[in-house]
C-alpha cells in the first residue's frame, strides 16, 4: 500500500469487490512472503484449497497436524495458516487454522476454479444445489433440516468468491502471473443459477443474490436480471453500509425498478437516494425520517416514482422523540392527483393540548406537487406536534400548508374536537381557493352538538356543506357530492330506536337454506332461500347471516359484487365483508346481524360501519351493537347491505381462513395442482366452492390470523413440490372472483403433503404445518347441488326403510316437538318388523311438510351420522350418479355380511364390529359413532398399507384377512365379497 501511495497510484484501483480485495492481498502475500517455500505457488494454492474445502464441508475451522501434513509439506511457514498449541486435559496438540474464516471460504472457491473443467463443474453444481436445498427447507424446523440449513448458510460465501473470481479483467493477471488455467464454464454456470434463483426467491435470499451480482460486476447482466423482477423485498433486515453501496451499483445499472421495499438507516439512505428515483413503487423503513427524504417526494411529483412511495420509521424510542414524523405515506391516485399522509409522533401525556394533530393527509395534483420545496415543508412539519407550538393557535398549521400550492383535499386526525378548532377551519377554507374537501376525525370524543350546529349554519352561508359521522366531520364545496339525501347517517335516530330482538348472535336458531335459480342471467349465482316458520333469530349455516324476524316469511338473499362507483367519496372506507342483496316478500325482517372478521383492540374497536345501498344512494349506518362475530343493525327497507372498514386505523390482524381445492387431473398430467386460497373468515365457503365446482374441496383446520397488506409465503413438504408465487400479499377479497392465492404442484403419486403459512414481515408461522391428504373425496358437494332435507328423504326413501335402526329414538324426538300425532306414533311403535316401522314414519313425514322432514334429518344425522354421510357422498349422492367399485354392498351381499357378523359377534371377548366399504366409510356398526369413526379410519389406513406391502412381495396375494395386535386390544379385518 505504501508503494502505491509513493508512486501516486489510486490505492483503490481495481479493488471494488470483496473478491478483488482478497485476490490483491493473496497476490501481495505470495510475492513477498512465499519465496522460500518448497511448494510452487499453484501447488500451494491447490493444497490450501483442498484443506479449506474439507473444513467447509465438515464445518471445521481447526485442523490437526496430521491432516494438514497430508496436503502440504511445510505448514508452519505457510503465510495463510496460523499455528498454535491446543490444550487438552493431559496433553497439548499442535493445531492449525486459516488466518481468518473468510480465507477458508476464499481458498475453497479458488480451489474449485483451479480444478479441471469437468471436476470444477461437478463441485460447483453440488455447492449450488446444497445452498438452494437449504433455502427450500428454511421454513421447516426439525433437527435434520436445521443441519442442512446451517450448512447452506456456511457455504454461501464460497459462491460469492466464485462470482468474484470470474471477473477476468481483475483476476486474469493473477492467474497468468502464476501460470494457472481457469475453467471457463463456471461463469456460465453461476449466471444461470443466479438468473433462476432471482425469479424463484424474489424476497427471501434476494440480498445474497444481489451481492452475487455485485461480485460478478457485469453491468449488462445486472440489468438483465433486475428487469425481469416484479418486486424486491429487503425489509426483513436492516441494510448495512456495504449492502447499500452494493445496491447503489445494482440500481445504477437497471433501467427501471418495479416494487422495492427496504429497511435502512437515514444515514445509509443518503447512499441510495439518487438511485431510488427510478422505482415505480417504493417502501422504506428508516430509523427516523429527516428532511432529506423531501427529495424522494419531489421525485414522486416529477413522475420519476410512478405509483407509490411509503416511508415509515421504526418504533421510536425516548431518545428520538425530537424526530416527530412517525411515518410518511404517499400514494398516487386517479386523475394524476397525489395523496400525502403524514403520521406524527405525539406525546402520551394526559395534559396534551387540544389542538394536537396525529395525522395530516393532503391531496394535490402531481404538477403542482413538483413545485413544492419539500425539504422546507418537512422542517416545518417537525415542529407541528410540539406542545409549545400547539398551545398557541392554529396559525402553525396554516404556515405549514401555505408551502404547498394547489391543495385539493386536507384531512386531519386530531385528539379532541373543541371550539378552538373553529377559527382554524374557517382560515383553511378561506386561505386555499383550490381546496374542495376538508375532513377532521376526532379520536377521543364525539363532535359536540353546539359546535355541529354552529358550523352547519355558518358553512351553509358561505357555500359549503357539512356532514357529521360519529367522530368525523366532512366539509365540502356545495357541489352535491355528498348531500344529506345521499349520506344518511341517522346516528341519533338509530340509537334511539328499540333494540328489541338484537340479542347475541350465538342464540339464533341455525338453519340450512335451500338454493334457487331466479333467472338465466343469474344462473351462475347462488341464491339462498329461507322459509321462516315463526318470529325469532335465525342464523344461516352457510353465510352466518342472522335474520331477526317478526313473524313468518320467505327470505331470498345472495352475494353480489361491490361496485366501486358507489363508494366514490368514501376514500377512508373499504369493504370489510361480502355485499348481500336481501329480499323478504312480506317485510317481516326487523334486524340483521352481518358476520365480520375483525379482531378488536382499543385502536380499532370503532372501525366498522354498515353500507346500505338503495335507489342509487348510499347510507352509512352506525351499528347498534358489535360483538366478537357480528355487526348488528335495525332495518326498515331491504336491498344491498355490506360491512365497511374505516382505513384511518393502522392495519391489524383479522380472522382469516385457508381453503384448499384439488384440481381434477387429466390422463397426460404428471402433477396434481392444489389451489390455496387466503380469505377473510366472513367469506362464505359455499361461495368459493360454487365458483370452483370442478375442483375437490379438501377439509382441514382453516382458521388463522392474517394482517391486511402483509406478505406471506406457503411452505410445502416434500421439497420436490413447487409453490407459486414465492410470496403474496394478503388482501380483503369479497368477490366477484375468488382466485387462488398460491398454487402447489405435487407429483401425481404423492398422497400426502405438509403445508404451513409463514409471515414474511415478522418471520413467524401463522398457520402451523399440518398433514393434507390428496386422496380423499370432497365431503360437501357444491351449494347449488346439495340436497335439501326434503330432497334427502325423498331420494333415499328405500335405503332409509332398509337401513335405519334407531326408528323409535327418532320417533320419540318428533313426538317431543309435537310433530307426529299420538295415533301415528302408536302405529309406528306397534308395527313389526323394523322396516315396517320406518315405512309408517316416512308416511308421517310426507304429510307433515318441510319442517318435519328437516327435524327428522337432524335427528337421523345425530343418531346415525355414518349412514347420512354415506348416502350424501356415496353412490346416491350428487358426486356419483353411477355405481362405482367403492359403492356399498347390494342387499344380497348384506345378507352374507349379517351372517358373518353374527358368527364373529358370538366369539368370546368380541366387543364390537364395524363394516366399512372400500373407501373406508362405515356402513354398519355396533359401536358408538365416535368410536366407529376413529376405528374405521385407522383400520382402513392399516389394511390399505398392509395390502400394498404384501402385493409388493407377492403380486398374487390379495390379503383377505389381517390381524392387528396393539397393546390392549386385538383387531381382525376380513374382506367380504370385494366390497366390505
Image: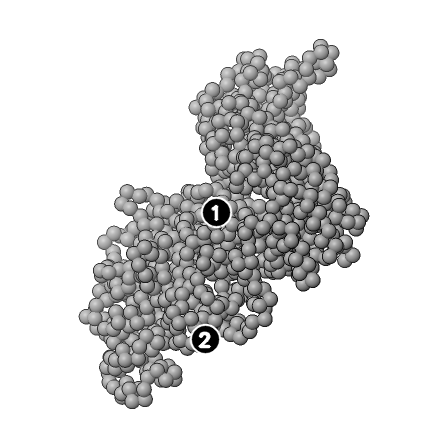
Q: Is residue 748 visible?
A: yes
SS type, badge 1:
strand
User: Considering depth in this image, is 161 or 290 the residue closer to the camera?
Assistant: 290
Q: Secondary structure at mark 2?
A: loop
Q: Is residue 640 above or below residue 865?
A: above
- Report the front residue among 365 and 864: 365
- Please determine whether, in this image, residue 865 is positioned above or below residue 415: below
Query: Which one is in front in this view, the residue at disc 2 or the one at disc 1?
Result: 2
Residue at (35, 67) in percent of width and height: 514
Q: Nearer the viewer, residue 54 or 766?
A: 766
Labels 2 & 1 near each other (Cβ < 8 A): no
Image coords of residue 796 (percent x, y): 26, 70
Structural crowding at the residue carrying mark 2, measured as other residues with C-alpha within 10 Å and reported as few (<14), some (14–19) or many (≥20): some
Q: Residue at x 40, y 75 (%)?
A: 552
Q: Residue furthest top?
A: 7
Residue name at image x 38 percent, y 83 percent: 817
Q: Residue furthest left?
A: 892
Provide the residue designation for mark 2. 550
Kindly identify which numbered label has been placed on residue 672. none
Of the numbered discs in the image, which one, if any, rests on residue 715? 1
Q: Position of residue 781 (x, y in %)?
A: 33, 60
Amino acid at each position: 500500500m505504501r508503494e502505491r501511495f509513493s508512486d501516486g497510484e489510486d490505492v483503490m484501483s481495481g479493488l471494488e469487490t470483496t473478491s478483488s480485495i482478497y485476490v490483491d492481498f493473496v497476490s501481495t502475500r505470495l510475492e513477498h512472503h512465499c519465496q522460500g517455500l518448497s511448494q510452487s505457488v499453484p501447488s500451494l494454492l491447490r493444497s490450501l484449497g483442498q484443506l479449506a474445502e474439507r473444513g467447509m464441508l465438515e464445518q471445521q475451522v481447526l485442523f490437526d497436524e496430521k491432516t494438514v501434513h497430508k496436503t502440504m509439506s511445510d505448514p508452519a511457514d505457510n503465510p495463510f495458516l496460523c499455528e498454535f498449541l491446543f490444550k487438552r486435559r493431559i496433553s497439548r496438540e499442535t493445531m492449525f487454522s486459516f488466518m481468518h474464516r473468510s480465507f477458508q471460504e476464499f481458498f475453497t472457491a479458488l480451489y474449485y476454479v483451479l480444478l479441471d473443467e469437468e471436476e470444477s463443474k461437478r463441485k460447483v453444481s453440488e455447492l449450488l444445489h446444497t445452498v438452494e436445498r437449504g433455502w427450500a427447507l428454511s421454513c421447516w424446523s426439525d433437527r435434520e433440516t436445521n443441519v442442512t440449513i446451517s450448512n447452506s448458510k456456511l457455504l454461501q460465501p464460497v459462491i460469492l468468491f466464485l462470482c468474484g473470481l470470474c471477473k477476468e479483467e481483475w483476476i486474469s493477471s493473477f492467474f497468468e502471473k502464476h501460470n494457472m488455467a481457469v475453467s471457463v464454464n463456471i461463469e456460465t454456470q453461476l449466471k444461470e443459477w443466479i438468473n433462476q434463483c432471482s425469479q424463484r426467491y424474489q424476497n427471501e435470499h434476494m440480498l445474497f443474490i444481489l451481492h452475487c451480482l455485485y461480485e460478478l460486476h457485469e453491468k449488462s447482466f445486472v440489468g438483465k436480471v433486475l428487469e425481469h423482477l416484479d418486486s424486491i423485498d429487503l425489509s426483513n433486515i436492516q441494510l448495512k453500509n456495504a449492502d447499500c453501496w452494493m445496491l447503489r451499483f445494482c440500481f445504477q445499472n437497471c433501467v427501471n425498478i418495479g416494487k422495492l421495499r427496504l429497511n435502512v438507516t437515514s444515514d445509509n439512505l443518503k447512499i441510495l437516494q439518487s438511485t431510488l428515483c427510478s422505482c415505480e413503487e417504493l417502501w422504506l423503513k428508516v430509523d427516523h425520517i429527516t428532511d432529506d427524504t423531501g427529495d424522494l417526494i419531489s421525485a414522486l411529483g416529477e413522475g420519476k416514482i410512478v405509483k407509490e412511495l411509503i416511508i415509515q420509521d421504526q418504533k421510536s424510542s425516548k431518545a428520538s422523540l425530537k424526530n416527530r414524523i412517525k411515518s410518511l405515506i404517499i400514494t398516487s391516485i386517479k386523475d394524476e392527483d397525489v395523496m400525502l399522509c403524514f403520521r406524527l409522533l405525539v406525546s402520551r401525556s394526559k395534559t396534551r393540548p387540544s389542538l394536537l394533530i396525529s395525522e395530516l393527509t393532503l391531496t394535490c395534483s402531481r404538477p403542482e406537487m413538483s413545485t413544492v420545496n419539500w425539504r422546507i415543508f418537512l422542517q416545518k412539519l417537525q415542529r407541528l406536534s410540539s406542545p409549545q407550538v400547539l398551545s398557541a393557535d392554529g396559525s402553525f398549521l396554516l404556515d405549514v400548508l401555505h408551502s404547498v400550492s394547489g391543495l385539493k383535499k386536507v384531512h386531519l386526525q386530531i385528539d379532541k374536537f373543541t371550539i378552538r378548532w373553529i377559527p382554524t377551519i374557517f382560515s383553511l377554507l378561506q386561505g386555499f381557493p383550490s381546496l374542495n374537501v376538508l375532513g377532521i376525525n376526532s379520536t377521543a370524543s364525539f363532535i359536540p352538538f353546539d359546535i355541529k350546529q354552529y358550523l352547519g349554519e355558518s358553512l351553509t352561508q358561505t357555500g359549503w356543506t357539512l356532514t357529521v359521522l360519529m367522530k368525523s366531520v366532512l366539509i365540502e364545496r356545495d357541489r352535491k357530492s355528498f348531500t344529506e339525501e345521499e349520506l344518511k347517517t341517522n346516528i341519533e335516530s338509530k340509537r334511539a330506536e328499540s333494540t328489541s330482538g338484537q340479542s347475541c348472535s350465538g342464540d339464533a336458531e341455525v338453519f340450512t337454506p335451500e338454493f334457487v335459480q331466479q333467472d338465466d342471467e343469474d344462473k351462475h349465482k347462488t341464491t339462498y332461500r329461507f322459509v321462516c316458520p315463526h318470529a325469532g333469530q335465525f342464523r344461516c349455516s352457510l353465510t352466518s347471516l342472522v335474520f331477526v324476524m317478526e313473524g313468518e316469511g320467505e327470505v331470498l338473499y345472495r352475494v353480489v359484487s361491490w361496485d366501486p362507483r358507489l363508494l366514490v367519496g368514501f376514500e377512508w372506507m373499504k369493504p370489510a365483508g361480502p355485499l348481500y342483496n336481501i329480499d323478504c316478500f312480506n317485510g317481516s325482517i326487523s334486524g340483521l346481524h352481518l358476520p365480520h372478521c375483525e379482531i378488536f383492540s382499543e385502536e380499532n374497536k370503532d372501525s366498522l360501519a354498515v353500507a346500505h345501498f338503495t335507489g342509487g344512494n348510499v347510507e352509512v349506518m352506525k351499528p347498534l351493537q358489535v360483538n366478537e362475530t357480528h355487526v348488528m343493525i335495525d332495518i326498515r327497507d331491504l336491498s344491498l347491505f355490506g360491512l365497511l372498514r374505516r382505513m384511518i386505523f393502522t392495519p391489524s390482524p383479522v380472522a382469516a381462513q385457508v381453503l384448499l381445492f384439488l384440481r381434477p387431473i387429466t390422463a397426460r398430467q404428471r402433477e396434481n395442482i392444489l389451489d390455496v386460497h387466503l380469505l377473510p373468515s366472513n367469506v362464505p365457503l359455499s361461495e368459493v366452492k360454487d365458483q370452483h365446482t370442478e375442483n375437490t374441496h379438501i377439509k382441514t383446520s382453516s382458521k388463522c390470523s392474517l394482517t391486511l397488506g402483509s406478505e406471506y409465503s406457503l411452505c410445502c413438504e416434500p421439497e420436490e413440490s413447487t409453490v407459486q408465487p414465492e410470496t403474496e400479499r394478503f388482501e380483503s377479497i369479497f368477490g366477484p372472483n375468488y382466485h387462488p392465492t398460491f398454487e402447489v404442484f405435487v407429483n401425481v403419486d404423492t398422497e400426502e403433503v405438509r403445508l404451513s403459512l409463514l409471515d414474511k414481515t415478522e418471520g413467524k408461522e401463522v398457520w402451523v404445518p399440518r398433514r393434507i391428504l390428496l386422496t380423499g373425496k370432497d365431503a360437501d358437494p357444491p351449494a347449488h347441488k346439495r340436497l335439501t332435507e326434503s330432497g334427502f328423504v325423498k331420494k333415499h326413501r328405500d335405503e332409509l326403510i332398509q337401513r335405519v335402526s334407531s326408528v323409535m329414538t327418532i320417533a320419540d324426538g318428533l313426538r317431543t316437538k309435537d310433530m307426529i300425532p299420538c295415533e301415528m306414533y302408536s302405529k309406528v311403535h306397534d308395527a313389526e318388523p323394523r322396516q315396517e316401522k320406518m315405512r309408517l314414519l316416512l308416511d308421517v313425514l310426507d304429510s307433515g311438510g318441510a319442517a318435519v322432514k328437516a327435524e327428522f334429518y337432524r335427528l337421523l344425522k345425530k343418531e346415525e351420522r355414518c349412514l347420512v354421510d354415506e348416502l350424501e357422498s356415496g353412490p346416491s349422492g350428487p358426486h356419483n350418479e353411477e355405481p362405482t367399485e367403492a359403492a356399498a354392498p347390494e342387499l344380497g351381499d348384506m345378507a352374507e355380511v349379517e351372517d358373518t357378523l353374527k358368527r364373529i359377534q358370538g366369539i368370546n371377548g368380541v366387543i364390537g364390529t364395524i363394516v366399512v366399504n372400500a373407501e373406508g366409510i362405515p356402513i354398519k356398526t355396533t359401536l358408538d359413532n365416535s368410536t366407529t369413526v376413529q376405528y374405521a379410519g385407522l383400520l382402513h389406513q392399516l389394511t390399505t398399507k398392509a395390502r400394498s406391502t404384501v402385493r409388493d412381495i407377492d403380486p398374487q396375494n390379495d390379503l383377505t384377512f389381517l390381524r392387528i395386535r396393539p397393546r390392549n386390544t386385538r383387531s381382525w379385518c376380513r374382506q367380504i365379497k370385494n366390497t366390505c
